[in-house]
Amino acid sequence: MSTSALRVVIAEDMALLRDGMTRLLTAAGMQVVAQVEDPDALLAAVAAHSPDLAVVDVRMPPTHTDEGARAALHLHDAYADLGVMVLSQVIEQTLAARLVADPPPRFGYLLKDRVLDVDEFVSALHRIAAGATVVDAQIVDRLLGNAADGRLDVLSTREREVLSLLAHGLSNAAIGRRLRVSERTVDAHLRSIFAKLDLHPSADENRRVRAALAWLGSAPTPP
């Protein structure tokens, strides 16, 4: 597949933004196969058109809270080859924390007011369709700046460094390279972090995500 022929579904409830994005992507050589304004129509359009990429607003009807974010995650889980770009005017913390804790391939999250360069935006879409993860650096930095450090006082300095890098989305191997330690050492630090934060193995929850949420100050203190 040529990157110049990406087939795209746009999900945005504001008609002017939806039309403007359609014109922008069409001018960039992409084919917009559907424009929709709510999550149900988005899911139906993806099923009907099998696009390469879905561009999704976080807040859509009926409540304009996190419907778009939940639909985006569902699409990512249901369609392995589909790239998903989420756009938002605000940081949806649950989605952001999941992405920085365990970055999925073919997924992006950008803030609308920071998309200032059309070429960079189009480039990000191509990278996502090719398998990359794109998360706005301001999302990571703002979440880390809101960290509830008090609950993490039980961690050593090195464990806090490991947890910070995990929250930035680095793999164990990448954390080891950054800290110049072995991956086995990183594994040991993570086991200690999970134990100190009372994050036990569970089939229903990802401990890496929960640990990152604790760092980001978005999760309740473990009981």
Image: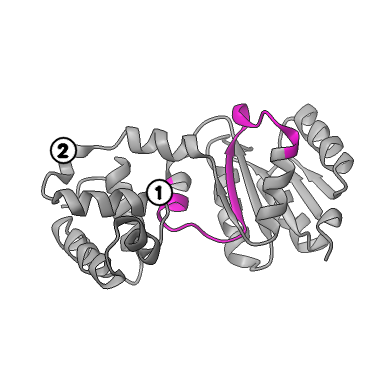
Residue 122 falls within the magenta-colored stretch: no
What is the magenta range? 97-119
Residue 114 falls within the magenta-colored stretch: yes
Q: CA distance from mark 1 to mark 2?
A: 19 Å
Q: Tell me the kind of residue under disc 1.
A: His
- Please give the label number shown on residue 168: 1
Q: Report whether 161 appears left or right of 138.
A: left
Kind of element beneath mark 2: helix
Seen from this angle, which residue lies furthest front?
Answer: 180
Q: Position of residue 46 (x, y in %)?
A: 75, 58
**What is the crowding at mark 1: few (fewer than 14 residues within 10 Å), some, or many (at least 20)?**
many
Q: Position of residue 16 (x, y in %)?
A: 79, 27
**What is the crowding at mark 2: few (fewer than 14 residues within 10 Å), some, or many (at least 20)?**
few
30 or 46, which is in the foreground?
30
Residue 140 is drawn in which quadrant?
top left
**Residue at the image position 29 percent from the left and 40 percent from the top:** 217
- Against 222, residue 205 (above or below) is below
179 or 166, which is in the foreground?
179
- Please give the label number shown on residue 15: none
Q: Tell me the kind of residue under disc 2.
A: Gly
- Quarter of the picture containing the N terminus is bottom right
Q: Position of residue 121 (x, y in %)?
A: 70, 40
